[in-house]
Amino acid sequence: MCELKQLDELLGDRQTRCGAVVISAIAGTAGVGKTSLALHFAHQVAHRFPDGQLFANLRGFDSVADPVDAASVARGFLDALGVPAHRIPADPEGQLAVYRSRLADTRTLIVLDNAREVEQVRPLLPGSEGCLVLVTSRNRLSGLIALDGAVPLPLDVLSREEAYELLCRRLGRESVLGSADAAYELIELCARLPLALNIAAARAAAHPDTPLRIWADELRDTRARLDLLAVGDGYADVRAVLSWSYRALTPEGARLFRLLGLHPGPDLSAAAAASLAGLPLSPTRSLLDELHRAHLVITQGGERYSFHDLLRAYAVELVDAYDSTEVRTESARRMYDHYLHSSHRAGSLAYADEASWPPLDLGERAPGVTSKDLTDRQQSLVWYRDEQTVLAQTAARALQDGFADHAWQLAGTQVSYLLKSGRWQQWQQVSEIALAAAERTGDLGRQAHAHRWLGQVHRSQGRQPEAHVRLRRAFDLFAQVGDRTRQGRTQIDIAITYGEERAYAKAITEARSALELFEAVDDPTGQATALNSIGWYLALRGEPREALPYCLRALELSRTCGNLPAQSSTLDSIGFIHHELGEYQDALPAYQESLRLRQSIGDYFLQAEIHTHIGDTQLALGDTQAARRSWTASLAILDDLQHRDAEAVRTRLNTWSNNRQ
C-alpha cells in the first residue's frame, strides 16, 4: 500500500536524525487502520532497529480507562528495556530522564498508539538521532507537527479497488466476482472503512451459503446498519469505536456533531452548520475545527464539511437519543430557512427577471439562521453550483419532515438554475417534490407552477406528449387562480413544445394567443418573448422576411425592460433569420452578442445552440476552421449534459471532416 511506501521513504530520509510520524485519518474516523499500519510497518523494519522496539497503547480514546500519561508509559518502557527496578527513580520526571538517557545513542523504534493529545507524546520523544517514533491518533496533533518536527501521514478510507481486494482476501475471489454488484454496494454501505468491511466480511464468511446481496440488503437500512457492524468485542464494533471519539468532544462540539445528523448531506457549509446549531458563524467555525481535529468531519475545500455514511448514521442515532423532538424540529427549521433564504437571494440576483422565477413570500427567518451573504449574479451562480446536490436533498427532506411550504419554495428557488444549467434529472426531481408539496397543501397556484416545471423538463428531454399534458394542466390551473401572466408564459412553453415537434403553424398560433394575453395585462417582457417566438417559428417555417419585424420589435422591448435572457434569445433569432436570408455578415455579430449575453448570465445549456449557429454561419462564410471550433464548443456542452442534440452536432463535425478528406 502507498502509506507503507511513504513510511519507508520517510525512514530512508531520516537515517541520521530522529523523526516522529503522525499517522492520522483524513476522513476523521476510527477504524481506518492506523494501528494496523503502524504495527505492520514496525514489524517490516524491526531489523533496522537492533536496540529494540517499544509499543504502548496511550488509551487516548478508550471506553473503559483513562488516557495513560507519559510518565507511566516511560516506567513501562524502562521495565521492557531491562533497567533494574532499584535504578528507576520514584518521581515521574526522574523516570522520564532515565528513559531518555537509556535511549541515547541507540537505534530504537517506538510505537505510541492511540494518543489523545500532544502532552502524552512529547515527553516520550527520544533525543537520539537513530530512533524513530510512530504516533497514531484520531486527533491531528498539530503541535507535535509544528514544534517537534513530526511528519503527518494522512490515512484515508480505502479506495473502491482496495476495498474490493480486501473482500476478495476475506471471502475468496471467486465468491466476490460472482456477486460483484452486491460487493461494490457493500463496500459503499461500509463507507470503505476497513473496520466495517472486516466486520461485514466476517459475518458473510460465517454464513457462506448466504449471498452477498442479502448482506447488502440488510445494511441498506441506515437505522440498523451500526447494529449489523458489530461482533460483540468493543474493538470490533463500529458504533463503540466511533463513540470513543465522540465522548472526547467538548459538550458544544458534541451537540454540533449530533445536529449534523439532521442534515441530508452530502456536505454543508459553515453557515449551514451555524444555522443548525443556532450559533453565530465564528464560534461555529471553532466547533467545526474541533470536529475536524477529532477526524469527525473532513473539509472539502473552502468552508465545506462532510462525513462518511457511518458517521452520519451514528450522528442520527445520537440526535434521536439525546435531543428532544422540539430541539430537532427547531434545528431543522433553521436549516431549511438557511437554504431557502440563501437560495432566494441567489435566485433574485441571477434570475429575478426571468419567466421561470416564481413569486415567493418567504416570511421571517427563524432566530439563529445565518444566510449566505451574496452580492452579485456571478457569486450567486457559484453558490448554486456548490449547493446544487444539497438543495435537492434538502427539499426532499423538508417534504419528508412535514415542512411542505419550505419544500415547495426550496424547489422554486432552484428551478431556474437547473433549467439554465441543463441539470435535467435534478430539475425533474425537485419539480416532483414541488408538486407533492403543493398537493399536500392544496395550493392550486403552486400546483400550476410544478406542472409547468415538469412540462419543461419533459419537453427538454424530448418527451413531447408528456410535456403537453403537464403544460395544459398548468395552463388550466393558472386560469383557475386568475394568473393570466403565467398563463401566457405557459402558452409560450406549449408553443415551444409544438416547435420541437416541427408543428410550426400550431406553435405560431399558441405564441399569438400568448401575445394577446401579455398585451391584455400590459407585460412588455412577456410581449417580447411572444414576439420573438412568432418570429422564430415563422423563420423555421421558411418565412424569414416576415419573421424579422417581429424579432426586431421583441429586441426593442427586451432592451427597454433590461431583460438580458430575452435579448440573448432574440439576437439568436435575428442571427438565424439573417443566415436564412444569406446575409451572413449580419448574422455573425448578432449571434456573437447573443452568446456573450448567455455567458454573462451563466446560461450554460443555451450557449450550445448559439455555438452551433455561429459554426453554421462561419462555414457559410468559408471559414471552416472557425466553424469546427464553434461546433466543438457546442458539442462539449451537450456531451457534458448528455443532451440528445449532441448527435446532430457530432454529425456536423464528422461531415466536415469527411468532406475535408
Image (spheres, rainbow, N blue to C red):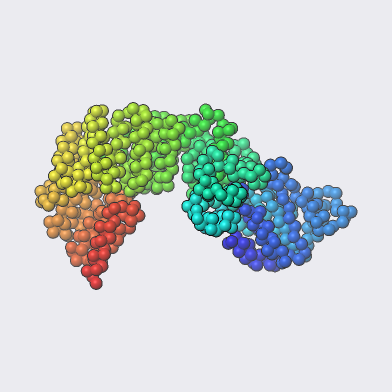
Query: Which quadrant is the N terminus positioned in?
Result: bottom right
Q: Nearer the viewer, residue 639 or 353?
A: 639
Residue 448: where, in percent of width, then height? 28, 33
Q: Residue furthest right?
A: 86
Residue reaching furthest to the bottom: 661
Q: Is residue 335 left or right of residue 45?
A: left
Q: Position of residue 269 (x, y in %)?
A: 48, 43
| Quarter of the image with the C terminus in it | bottom left
Give the total number of marks visible in the rendering: 0
Image point (66%, 61%), residue name: 41
Comparing 359 with 41, the one in front is 41
Taking depth in this image into account, of 243 and 134 the one nearest to the observer is 243
- Position of residue 529 relative to residue 127, above or below, is above
Q: Relative to 316, say whether 628 is above or below.
A: below
Drawn side of residue 182 relative to residue 92, left or right: left
| 542 or 497: nearer the viewer | 497
